[in-house]
Structures are given as C-alpha cells and as structure tokens.
Image (cartoon, rainbow, N blue to C red):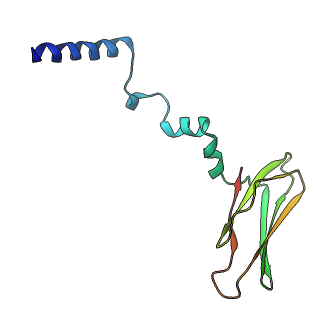
Amino acid sequence: MKMGKIAAVGAVAAGFAVLGFAAPAQAAEPAAAVAAADNPAYLLLAPAPNCVVLAQGRNGSTAWATATNTNCGYTVRVRMIWAWAGDGPCVSLPNNYYYRETRGAANIPPRPYVSELRSC
C-alpha cells in the first residue's frame, strides 16, 4: 500500500516536470529582481539621484541640511534621513530648486546630521 502512494506521488512529480512546471529554484528571474520591480517599498531604500546635491552644517545649536536639484531635468522626490534626529518628509524638488531642513543640535556629541538622501 505504501509503495503505491509513493509511486503515485513520483508519477505526479514526473508529470509536472514533463509539462514544464519548474521548481522555484529554476525560475527565470532572480527573486530580488522581481521584488524590486513589483514592490513599491523597495523604492524607499533607493538613494537619491546623483544630480541632487546635499549640503549640511551647523549654526550654533542648530543643524541644517539642504538638498538641491542641480539640473536633473525633471522633478525628483527625496527624503533626508537624519542620524540622531527624526527623519524628514518626502518632498518634491523641481529642477533647479532646493529644500532645507533644520534640527536642534546638542553642543556635545552625538550631533544630528543627514546620513543619507533617499528617493521616495
């Protein structure tokens, strides 16, 4: 009886192989490529384009950062990711415009700064 079930399972598996059903390991596209194309959350991790320039500094106890769209040729959406402070909102930067954010900065380390500029 057990041999009959094993033989039936083997026959079904062989039938799938003959019909062209592939195991996930034999998929045509890597899983990462599919996840990147179909998952909008992946875009939250993408860095801003190179045509968006980040400048930052401190004025007394205030940290500032400016993102500038330096002639990308299109409107970009960016978000400033701050270390030691809350992250900024997602903003649209038209061509040749800038956006500035400030954070209160401590006079002793750790001081807030923009660690990354992301597309959003």
- As drawn, is 1 to the left or to the right of 34? left
For image coordinates 39% across by 18% down, the residue present is: 21
- As drawn, is 86 to the left or to the right of 61? left
How many numbered badges does the structure rendering display?
0
Q: Decide which of 115, 50 is in the foreground and name it.
A: 115
Looking at the picture, does residue 48 appear above or below residue 85?
above
Q: Which residue sits furthest bottom?
A: 108
Looking at the picture, does residue 119 appear above or below residue 32?
below
Looking at the picture, does residue 22 appear above or below residue 76?
above
For image coordinates 22% across by 17% down, the residue present is: 9
Q: Quadrant of residue 34?
A: top right
Looking at the picture, does residue 97 appear above or below residue 2?
below
Q: Quadrant of residue 60?
A: bottom right
Work out which quarter of the rendered image holds the N terminus and state it: top left
Q: Quadrant of residue 62?
A: bottom right
Location of residue 94 in the rendering, given as x and y in whole percent from the top left corner? 88, 50
For image coordinates 39% across by 15% down, the residue present is: 20
For image coordinates 38% across by 32% down, the residue present is: 25
Q: Decide which of 72, 78 is in the foreground and name it.
A: 78
Location of residue 105 in the rendering, given as x and y in whole percent from the top left corner? 73, 80
Location of residue 49 in the rendering, given as x and y in whole percent from the top left corner? 73, 52
Location of residue 90 in the rendering, given as x and y in whole percent from the top left corner? 76, 54
